[in-house]
Image (cartoon, helix red, strand yellow):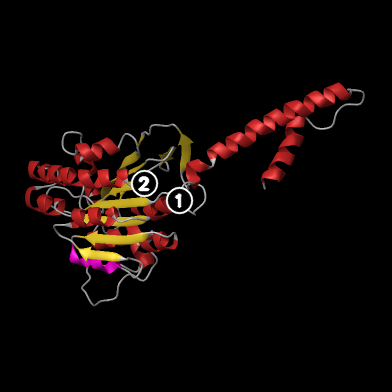
Amino acid sequence: MIRSLIAHTAVLLGGGALAPGSGADTTGRNRNMAAKRIGILCLGLLLAVPGWAQDVDTVLIVSIDALHPDALSEKTAPTLHALMHPGHYTLAGRSVDPPKTLIAHTAMLTGLTPAASGKQDNDWKPGEPRVAKPTLFDDARRRGYRTAFYYSKPKLGYLASEAVDETALAREDGIDRARAFFRRAGARFAVLHLSGLEFAGTESGWLSPEYLDELSYIDMALAPLLADVARRGRHLIVITSDHAGHDRLHGTRHPDDYRLPLIITTDGPCDVALPSGAFHLTALRGLVQGLLPSAGPPAVACRAGDPGRRIR
């Protein structure tokens, strides 16, 4: 492939056939100039390839249940707010209809609408069938990752398919379990679900002082885990949610109930640019797939040296 590229480039850069009588000296100069240009082009290609080809060996996806995008201020959530600068983020994400926990998380991990996935109710109990559609856990397994899923609501056990190597209902210790998971060697992929905001929102109201206090606690608790992931080497961190709420309600057709944030950060040399327009929760699987190894070039724009920007 490289040889054919060089040969084709030589024709393009050499300027085509020489005019009659142009002389051998002109031919030599043209060839030398073409060779230099080819060398520069090939060097650029070789330097550019590692930007997406080097493997990401640590992936963490955190879903903070019921997180309203407007709560992500530097004062309330300094840890998460800091991720918005080196990575890319949007506060204009949109959940599925209806915007409820299990339905939304199924859409998040399968990349399918509720109608397409078949999960249109918000209930599941142990012993009932689990998700049958492929999920991000299947994608990670195929790429050689050990996978883990820690969740704080029993109904999310629906998503703990056979593609998950380690799973637990972790109401209080999900972060500790994830830290222990990432201390082990090898390529690792984990999804962590955290709750607390939904209860604060239902009791005191979304964006109430009590709600913001709960987010501050979650933000502080996440800091050591995010530091652990960063120390493991090449990593990808995704922070998102399933839905938000309004007043003391959620799961309705109110516009705020559908809102969610998305933050993506990586230590790679490339700038991850989210697609333009509003981000839909069903797009998360494809976005992450495009950033995993052995998946070819990123499915999203990649430009070296860009410090990141906010996407509306």
Q: Which of the two discs, 2 and 1, labels the residue nearer the N terminus?
A: 2
Q: Quadrant of residue 209?
A: top left
Q: Amino acid at mark 1?
A: Gly
In the visual, does 108 lie left or right of 171?
right
- Report, in whole angstroms, how far the alpha carbon at label 2 lies from the one at label 1: 14 Å
Q: Main secondary structure of the magenta part?
A: helix
Along the line of sight, the residue nearer the viewer: 73 or 136? 136
SS type, badge 1:
loop
Answer few, some or many: residues within 10 Å of disc 2's Cα (few below 14, many 20 plus, some between 14 and 19). Answer: many
Answer few, some or many: residues within 10 Å of disc 1's Cα (few below 14, many 20 plus, some between 14 and 19). Answer: some
Along the line of sight, the residue nearer the viewer: 98 or 168? 168
Judging by the rendered image, the residue that carries numbered circle 1 is: 290
Image location of residue 175, percent across then percent down? 20, 53
In the visual, does 39 lie left or right of 235?
right
Q: Which contiguous range is marked in magenta? A: 153-160
Quarter of the rendering occupied by the C terminus: top left
Q: Nearer the viewer, mark 2 or mark 1?
A: 2
Residue at screen point 47% across, 34% down: 304
| Picture disc at residue 235 | 2
Q: Is residue 198 above or below residue 308?
A: below
